[in-house]
Image: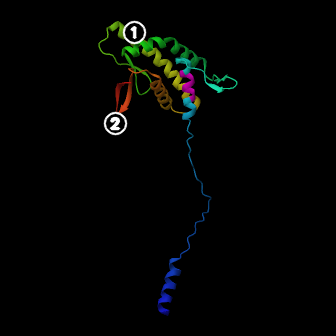
Amino acid sequence: MKKVFFILSTVALISCAKVNLQTSQPLKVDINMRVDVYQHVAKDVESIQDQIYGSTPKQINAILLMNEAYAQEYSADVTAAIERRKTRLGTIDKYFAKGYIGENKDAYLQYVAKGLLTDLKNTVESIIAEENADRSAIYKAIAQKNGVDVSETAKVFFDDDYKRAPSGYWFEVYEGGQYIWKQK
């Protein structure tokens, strides 16, 4: 019995080795944390889209009937792009409704019709080029303001456009593991 106790005691002492966790230099932990700015981008997108498409004023205080105010933090170029988009909205909507154009996954307009006469096709493509140039300026400004990539900003615009669009408009959507053109 004494031998068993002695062997167990020896094993217990040997197995209880001390591990030193001290370092000569303090440990440095580098934590890169991405602050989710989606909400900020979404608010900017909604503000711009409301200026282009129009919306009912939001109520901050129902008792005082005060409307929500947006501080304009956009450059003159962006403001001009917003105004041009407002001006061409009727034409864009007409082309969407007729199925001449659609919005691709990057939130830019794209020619989707087949068989249009050359003059009409050129007119449609000209409007698309103008609209996409203004969209690009707006997307870049919002991305720069919020410190995000332009593609992230474009995705928020795409989601908002899809939500606002009536049935029948063409969009490039992700379905079945690939992007396809589909009517809403």
Q: Residue furthest left?
A: 115
Looking at the image, which residue is at 42% across and 15% down? Answer: 128
Disc 2/disc 1 C-alpha distance (Å) = 34 Å
Q: Residue furthest right?
A: 64
Q: Secondary structure at mark 2?
A: loop
> How many numbered circles are shown?
2
Q: Is residue 82 visible?
A: yes
Give me the disc on residue 38: none
Q: Measured along the vertical axis of the image, is residue 28 above or below residue 119?
A: below
Q: Nearer the viewer, mark 2 or mark 1?
A: 2
Q: Secondary structure at mark 1?
A: helix
Mark 1 Cα within 10 Å, few/some/many (few <14, many 20+)? few
Residue underneath mark 2:
177
Towards the viewer: 128 or 175: 175
Q: Position of residue 93 (x, y in %)?
A: 44, 14
Instruction: Please identify the quadrant where the C terminus is shown.
Output: top left
Task: Give the vertical position of 56 relative to 20 (above or below).
Answer: above
Question: 10 or 169: nearer the eye?
Answer: 169
Which residues lie in the magenta part?
43-49
Judge from the rendering whether residue 56 lies leftward or rightward of residue 98; answer left or right.
Answer: right
Q: Main secondary structure of the magenta part?
A: helix
Q: Residue 42, position in %: x, y?
A: 54, 30
Q: What percent of the width, then of the height, locates residue 39?
A: 56, 34
Can residue 147 be seen here? The reply is: no
Indicate the position of residue 153 as horizontal and vertical percent values.
51, 29
The residue type indicated by label 2 comes to Gly
Residue that appears at 32% across and 11% down: 116
